[in-house]
Amino acid sequence: MYRESATSFEIARDLGVVDADGLARASSLSADRHFLFISAPFGPFCRELAQALRGTGARCTRVILNAGDALDWGARSAAPYFGGLPGWTGWLNRQIGRLGVTDIVTYGDSSPYAAEALILAQSLGLRRHVLEQGYFRPDWVTLERDGVNGNSRLPRDPEWYLRHPARGGRTSEERVGLTTPSAIYLIVRHHAAIYAGAPLFPRYRAAYQHSAFRQAMTHCWRFVVGRLTAERARRAHEALVATSAPIFLALLQRPGDSQLWRHSDFETAAAFVERVVTSFAAHAPADAQLIIRAHPLDPGIDDHGKLIRRVAQREGVAEQVHYLDHGKLHEVLPRIAAAICVNSTAGLSAVEFGKPTVTLGKAIYDMPGLTHQGGLDSLWTKPEAPDPELYDAFRRVVIATSQVNGAYSTPLGRSLAASEMARRLMGRTA
C-alpha cells in the first residue's frame, strides 16, 4: 500500500496542502478543528471519515440537504437545511458562526451548494478541502485544497514536475476491489431515500440536467439494448480497429457533467461533437477514421448516434465517422493515432498509453510535453506525443500530493481512504 514519503510531504507543503509542522502539531490542535461537510460521496464514507477525524479529537458536522444525506450520515451532529438555493449562503454563514467551523469539506467543487460554500469559506478565511474521484482510477481518490480538476492548485509547468523529488516516490497501491457494483447500490439507495423523503426537503434541487429517476430508467434501457446488440457491436468494433488507416478517438463527457460547462467553452456534448467532426472533415487525412466514444456512465438520454450521423453527413465524412458505445477503453487505445477530449481522466489514460492527446477544456494534465499543444486542427496531421519521462514524474507527484489510496464505495476502499484522509486533513493547519 502507498505511504506518503518525506519528499512527497515537502511537495504537499509547497502546494499549500499541509503546513510544514502541521502533522506534529495536529494532536494539540485537534480540539480547535471543526469540519463541516457540505456534500459527500454517496454512501457511508463521509460518516466513516468523520469517525476517523473524531478519533483525533476534532469535531465534525454534516449539512443535510435531503433524505439521502440523512440516510448516509445519520442523526448525530447533523445540520438539516430545509430552504432553497436563494437562502443557502446566508443560512450557511450563520451555521459556521454558531458552530465555530474551521474547515469546509465538499465532494466536488461545481454543484451550486458546494460552489457557494467554497466561496463563502474563502471569504471567511476557512480551510477548504475538496474530495473527488481519483485522477488515477480505480484505486485512488482525490483530496485537494480549494478545488479539483480545472480549479486544482497543481501547476501546469512541466519543469516543476521534473525537478521535484517526489518524482522518485512510489506509486504502488492496495487494490480496493470492484467499485462499480457497490457504487451502483449506494447511488440507488441514496436516490431512493431522496424520493421517499422529498416532502421533508421540498426546496432541495439536485444539480442534474435530468431527474435521477429518468436517468435510472434510461440506464436500464441502455444496458438491455447493449446486451441485445453486443455481438453485432463487437464485430463492428473489431473490423474498425483492424483497419490500416489512422484512427482518432474522441471521448464524450457524461451529458450534464459540470466539468463540461464549468471548465470548458462547451455547454453540451453536442457542441463538442460539432467542433470535433467539423475539424476532422477539414483537416484530417483522406483515409482517417474518427471514433466518437460514449462515456461509460452516459444514461443514454441524448441520442449521440443520431447527432453524429447528422453532423458527419453534413460535413461529407459519414463513412469515416463512427459512434462507439461498446467495449473497454484499453481495448481501443493501443490502436489509435491520437485522442481528443474535454478534460476527462480517460484522456489521461490515453497519455499513459503514449498517445498524442488534445484537451479542449481545462485539465490538470494539459501542459507541454504531456498533451498536444498545437490545437485541434493540427492534431490530425502533426500530433505531439507525450514524453514518457514527464508523464512518470507527473503521475508520481500528483499521487504524492493529491491522491489517496482507496475508494468511496467498497468497504476496504473506504477504510483505506478514511484513515489516510483524516491524517492528511489534521495536518492542514494553514
Image (spheres, rainbow, N blue to C red):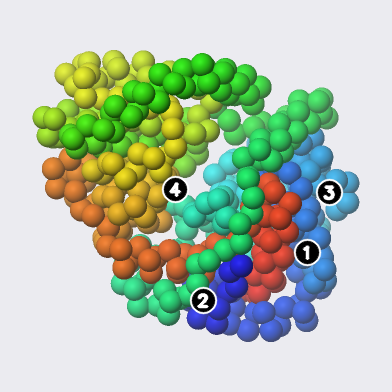
Which quadrant of the view contains residue 334? top left
- Please identify the quadrant where the C terminus is shown: bottom right
Residue in the image at 67% along x and 55% along y? 413
Q: Badge 1, how many Cα within 10 Å: few under 14, some, many 20+?
A: some
- Rounded to the nearest whole Å, what is the CA distance between mark 2 and mark 1? 23 Å
The residue furthest right is 75
Q: Is residue 130 visible?
A: no
Residue position for label 4: 345
The residue where tag 2 is placed is: 8
Looking at the rendered structure, the kind of residue marked 4 is: Thr
Residue in the image at 88% along x and 51% along y? 76
Q: CA distance from mark 4 to mark 3?
A: 34 Å
Query: Tag 4's secondary structure?
Result: helix
Q: Earlier in the sequence, mark 4 or mark 1?
A: 1
Helix, strand, or loop for circle 3?
strand
- Crowdedness of circle 3 by 10 Å Cα count: few (<14), some, many (20+)? some
Q: Which mark is residue 78?
A: 3
Q: In terms of sequence position, does the residue under pointer 2 or pointer 3 come before the other?
A: 2
